[in-house]
Amino acid sequence: MTATIGAVLVAEIGSLTTRVTLVDDVDGESRMVGHAETSSSVEPPFQNALYAILEAAARLAEMTGRQLLRDGQLIMPQTADGDGVNQLVAVTSAAGPMSVVLTAIAGDVSARSATHAIRATYTALLQVVTLDDAAEQPALSAGELSWIERQVQALLNLRPDAVVIAGGLEGGAVDAVNRLAHIVGLTALSTSVDPSGQQRQQITARPVIYAGNSNAHDRVVAALSDRAEISVADNVRPALDRENLDPTRREISRLYEKQILPRLPGIAVLRRMSRTGVRTVCDVTGLMTRFVAERYGRRLLVVDVGAASSAAYWAAPGRYQLAVLGTEGVGYGLPQVLNASGIAAIQRWLPFAMDGQAIQQRILNKVLRPQTLPASREDLYLDHALAREALIHAVHALGEQGVVNAQREQEPVLEYDWVIAGGGVLAHAPNPGLALLAVLDALQFTGDQSAPLFDVHLDILGLLVACGGLASLDPDLAVTLFDRDLLGNMPLATCVIPRSEGRIGEVALEVELGIVGGRTERRTVRHGELVRLALPQGRFGHVTLRPASGVRIGKAEPGEEVPSDLGQIKGSALGIVIDARGRPLAFAADAREQRKRLWSWLVALGAETGANPDQEASPAVEALLGREAVTTAVPEPMVVGTTEATPAPSRGRRISLDELAGVEEPEVPAAPPPEDDLAQLRQTVETPKRRGFFRRGKE
């Protein structure tokens, strides 16, 4: 239990940064005692992940006054004087991606599902080979290589870490899948010439995961029996209207831990020091995402942008999806972000003019020196522009998953009422408004959201990963750390995104915020605006949303008033934020006008003040379009009594937040197949009782 486990040092080893968190008993309860971070040591000249852990531990010792090191080594176990630690828990995302080639029958069916499945961990998709490509090839001319010969030659040059074969609906034909197996088998053969001039053929048996029609299993195994290390997973696309991703996800993750994780420099020493071994960051983050969603009965979206990879995780009671983009990040992964987005997409997030060549030069410098901190406002905003694009790609990849099953089961796709964001760029943002704007810009879901409000939380210390790492060591400790420490660092805002097609500058809704024991504030929100109403941490409030006709809040009817319960909204760094910019976001055709809009959003969230110094306009930033546009300064709050200061827009009947969200406790589906860590976490707490809209207790 947490009272007897003693001090634990949790180390998150990233490709760029290593974080350490010290957890120990404080007044009978396990709490975070300290946190430190330093540059990772997996690259030359050190090439040993342990060195950075020791350096961060030394900094932690200076801050806490505890002695954690002796003669340059961790003191283990903890002494009677409280020095040292009893346990070391290590998780990492720095081992690098696993290169994968997909072979499938149809690009828009089995190949798409296989792509979703391999995003369960850090992978790099090198190439997709589909038989429908072969059907589109023109007739061969004399001496030209056939399609199969070209594919075999290409795969021989790629030399992937693993190959995935997918295709064939259950009960369908097996010949096409067997053909794919023979192509993969040919890539295992290589020809060389020995010193005597004789040609010799060698077989390189690489790992192959078969996730296709089960009827073709025997023929595929026979075709690859002596040319591959084959493992079999259930069909990733058993029917046109159903995906089955989990079995292939587990095989991909198992293969990563077997083949790629041992490449982490210094992992042998870490495994000897850690009772729990070394796990991947995406594995433990997914574990905590599922557990937190179940425990609180909420729909949780977790987004993370790192130096080499980006990821998005979504969970609701009984449902889970994840998308890990193993080669897209804001450091080493910048070339892939630039290639996927293009210069124009990055320029639209900059509040100042910067030509494409300058952006490319700065990105190249960032790739060569990813540890360099922003030295100017331009560097800072470019980092956040790139972080937006990486998050957009991760969220989009997540949104693509589960669509087939959701349509079949008539369920919503990726509804969320809680967002937890992490990653160094966001965590180190000089202003919380800058981090929130990047998150809101990345949330481009256009599906119906039943939740009228959603909370955004910034994990500034990376504690979600620490909790996941601790879960296999002591589930109670992981839960306590999440409840007592993570949830206080730092709640960003409670957000509302009205749904409408209104013109910029027209009234979208009125919002009224009543603070418990304090004043009432009313604001008019126009289309195209971001509006913030302050509700400090430690305070509680209730909000009433009065949309104009044609504007919907959640799944309410257009124009319906939506009030919360008294004291239901908890305070946060930015309070209540109304995002009336619409989804998907509308960008101005004129670049100068778009920079005005972006600056006004930054001002609204407190990240900037005054006029944009890079604009050639008048001293005050002009309205977005016409007179009734977004102002460039945060309007003064309007304190009112019993009378309204502005007329309410047209609206219909009154509907409560609880009525919108459904106050009935959701029926939790049958649990997924037993998983030790998740099962242990579930045993630490009782099923939560029914709570308010956010299912939070009124304390």
Image: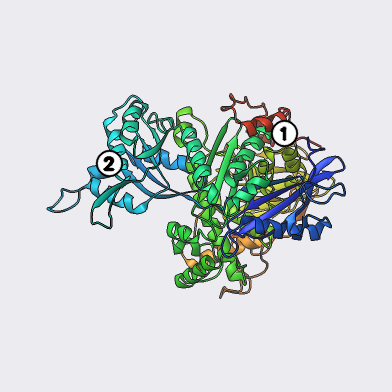
Q: Residue at x 53, y 51 (%)?
A: 263
* Relative image position of residue 229 (x, y in whole percent): 40, 38
Quadrant location of the C terminus? Answer: top right
Q: Amino acid at mark 2?
A: Asp
Residue 692 is marked as 1
Q: Is residue 509 visible?
A: no
Task: Answer above or below: position of 110 versus 67.
Answer: above
Quadrant location of the N terminus? Answer: top right
Sequence-first disc among 1 and 2: 2
Instruction: Give the residue number, with chain letter if any, for mark 2.
Output: 132
Residue 402 in the figure: left or right of residue 628: left
Task: Answer above or below: position of 210 versus 191.
Answer: above
User: Which label lies toward us, 1 or 2?
Assistant: 2
Task: Answer above or below: position of 154 versus 249.
Answer: below
* Relative image position of residue 379 (x, y in whole percent): 58, 69
Q: Amino acid at mark 1?
A: Gly
The part of the image, by quadrant, that contains residue 274 is: top right
Q: Is residue 49 visible?
A: yes
* Relative image position of residue 562 (x, y in whole percent): 66, 39
Looking at the picture, the colour scheme in use is rainbow
The part of the image, by quadrant, that contains residue 476 is: top right
Q: Residues within 10 Å of mark 1 (few under 14, many from 20)?
A: some
* Relative image position of residue 78 (x, y in whole percent): 80, 47
Residue 404 is marked as none
Q: Residue at x 76, y 59 (%)?
A: 71
Residue 413 in the figure: left or right of residue 534: left
Q: Among all residues in the image, which is located at the extreme left?
A: 142
